[in-house]
Image: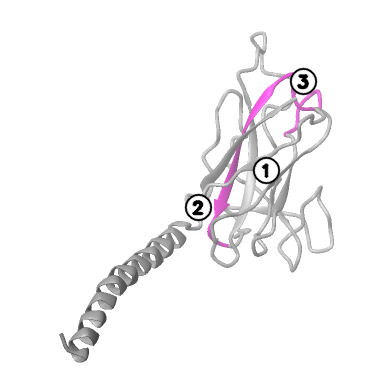
Amino acid sequence: MTRRTHRRAASHVAASFALPAVCALTAAIAIAAAAGAAVGPFAPVSVSVPAHPSAAGDVRIGFRPRGRLPRGGFYYAVLVLHDYATGGGPPACAVSSDMARTEYRSPSGARRLGLTILRARSSEGRWCAGATYLGALYAVPHAPRCSYSSPCYGRTTQLVGPCWIVGEGHQVCGVVVRQPPYSYPGGLPRPIDSSSRIVGRFEVRF
């Protein structure tokens, strides 16, 4: 076999090994790209809750967004009373979070976010002691509309609980369910905005 023949054979062997390697690399890139594309605006998230919340206080939850909401999109959360013995009448404690004053938070990069959940009005003025509340974190793929059909509360110069009207660096509080007010037992409510999606579920025990 001549030297030229040896070179041709070596080149053929090298190409035979290189082709599968290139194919494997291409496949890996394609899989990674598909995985990245699969994380849409409604990717599920884990929600952290306080271990020992006070029945007389607000509830603060935390989460790290995984999906990428469109510009202006936001998150909010609600709580509803679950499987609570009432003795026949409506509970005297809060049957849900305040769905007429619900905090909105827009994502800021990949940073962890927090939401304060206010309790609904009740004769006792507190969450139900010893009760479990089911929670849901919603993602909305557009800016708060703050319209007649989807109102928000507060003014640019007035703080209402943890909530401000829309503004740079401020949060918003809004109405997230239609009238009449939420009543127990009703499960998780249907949002006013049909584009909203649940991206996290959690429980809070008092």
- Label 2, on which residue? 42
Could one spot residue 178 in this view of the protein? no
The quarter of the displayed image where residue 205 is located: top right
Q: Earlier in the sequence, mark 2 or mark 1?
A: 2
Q: Position of residue 117 (x, y in %)?
A: 73, 41
Rendered residue at 74%/22% (across/down): 128
Q: Nearer the viewer, mark 3 or mark 2?
A: 2
- Distance in Å between CA atoms under marks 3 and 1: 23 Å
Between residues 169 and 9, which one lies in front from this camera angle? Answer: 9
Res 129 label: 3
Could one spot residue 97 in this view of the protein? yes
Q: Earlier in the sequence, mark 3 or mark 2?
A: 2
Amino acid bearing label 2: Phe
Amino acid bearing label 3: Ala
Q: Report the magenta residues as a range.
A: 120-142
Instruction: Residue at the far left: name it.
Output: 1
Is 15 a magenta residue? no
204 on left or right of 198: right
Res 90 label: none
Q: Earlier in the sequence, mark 3 or mark 1?
A: 1
Q: Position of residue 29 (x, y in %)?
A: 40, 67
The quarter of the displayed image where residue 184 is located: top right
Between residues 203 and 160, which one lies in front from this camera angle? Answer: 203
